[in-house]
Amino acid sequence: MFGASIGRNVQIFPSARITFPWLLAIEDDVVISWDVKVYNLGAIKIGAKTVVSQHAHLCGGTHDFNTPEFTLLRTGLTIGKNVWIAADAFIGPGVSIGDNVVVGARSVVLKDVEADMLVAGNPATVIRKINKPARKSK
C-alpha cells in the first residue's frame, strides 16, 4: 500500500493512478473505478461509502501563477462520506466536498460543496438539495 491508509472493503481498480500513496487516506467501503487519477500532491481524504467513477480526476495540487517561480501548491482535497463522484468529473485543488453529495458526470468542481447537494456543470453549480440514503455495507 506504500503508506496509504486504506479502510475495509475498498476496491481500487487496476488502472487507477495514485501519485503519492502515502498522502492518501480512504475510509471503509470506497470504490475508486477505472482510470481514476488521484493526483495527490497534498493529502487527499475520501470518506466511507464513496464512489469515484471512471475517468474522474482528483487534483490535489496547483501552481501559484502570480509568482515568478510558478510555486507548487500542495493543497490536497477532502471528499466526505456517502459521495458519488460521477464519470469524468474533475475535483479541483483544495476543494472540500461534504457528506451525501452527488457530483454529476463531467462536472468541474472548483469550490467547496456543502453536504446533501447535487452539483453539476462547468463550473459545477448546485442543482438541488438531495436526501440521499446511505449505501449499505457488503
Image (tube, helix red, strand yellow):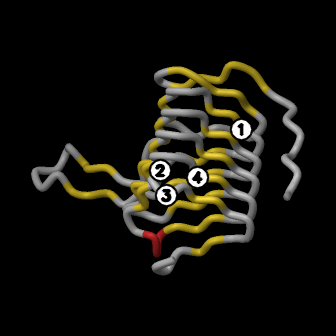
**Comparing labels 3 and 1, the label whose residue is closer to the camera:** 3
Q: Quick check: 33 left or right of 114?
A: left
Residue drawn at the location 78% of the way across and 36% of the way down = 116
First of labels 3, 1 by sequence position: 3
Q: Distance between the residues labelled 4 and 2?
A: 19 Å
Where is residue 2 drawn, in percent x and y? 46, 79
Residue drawn at the location 73% of the way across and 65% of the way down = 9
Q: Which mark is residue 110?
A: none
Which amino acid type is marked by label 3? Answer: Pro
Q: Mark 2 points at which residue?
A: 94
Q: How far apart are marks 2 and 1 (CA)?
A: 17 Å
**Comparing labels 2 and 1, the label whose residue is closer to the camera:** 1
The quarter of the picture where the C terminus appears is bottom right
Q: Mark 4 points at which residue?
A: 32
Q: Mark 3 points at which residue?
A: 14
Q: Distance between the residues labelled 4 and 1?
A: 16 Å
Q: Mark 1 points at which residue?
A: 101
